[in-house]
Image (cartoon, grey):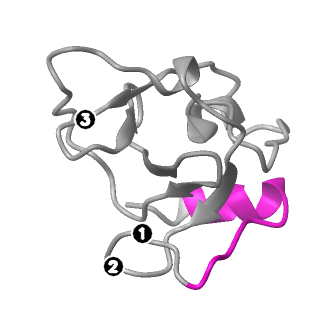
Amino acid sequence: MTNEKLSQIWNGYCPESYLAGKTVRMRLNQWDFFESEETGLQIFVLTGVQAIILNFRGEGKFRLTPKYADEIESGELLSPQNTKRPPFNDPTEVFQGSGQIENYIKSIK
């Protein structure tokens, strides 16, 4: 990854791609998660509150009618998945900085 710094506030684009110096859109998939069209990174959104980076990759199975996160994002805070069931982040936890986000993303297979 690069020396790019991620904001704790999600902008609707793929944070993993941003770290590599790219701007990649995230599209709604069949499971109602936003998925990076490049990396498969998935984010579950609690609108206006949290953008939870899931700890598993998507499979590129997108909805037929495209819906992109950058068109609707509301300044959610990036958070890690810390439970297996929705809302995927309970108790509420948010990343404390760019390095913490980067390390979490590196651990996702």
Residue type indicated by callout 1: Pro
Report how far apart the C-alphas of labels 1 and 3 lie in the structure: 17 Å
Mark linked to residue 48: none
Residue found at x 82% / y 35%: 4
Lateral position of residue 37 relative to residue 77, left or right: left
Find out whether residue 109 is within the magenta segment. no
Residue type indicated by callout 2: Lys
| Residue at which label 2 appears | 84
| Residue at which label 3 appears | 29
Screen quadrant of the N terminus: top right
Circle count? 3
| In the depicted structure, whether residue 77 falls above or below residue 35 | below
Q: Find residue 56 and report its image quarter.
A: bottom left
Q: Secondary structure at mark 2?
A: loop
Magenta-tinted stretch: 91-105
Residue 25 position, x and y percent, is 49, 21
Residue 105 position, x and y percent, is 56, 57
Residue type indicated by callout 3: Asn
Report how far apart the C-alphas of labels 2 and 3 lie in the structure: 18 Å
Graded by Cα atoms within 10 Å as few (under 14), some (14 to 19) or many (20 or more), the crowding at tag 3 reads many
* Nearest-to-viewer mark from 1 and 3: 1
* Nearest-to-viewer mark from 2 and 1: 1
Residue found at x 79% / y 42%: 6
Lateral position of residue 1 relative to residue 68, left or right: right
Q: Secondary structure at mark 3?
A: loop
Find out whether residue 99 is within the magenta segment. yes
| Residue at which label 1 appears | 87
| In the depicted structure, whether residue 47 falls above or below residue 108 | above
Residue 16 position, x and y percent, is 59, 40
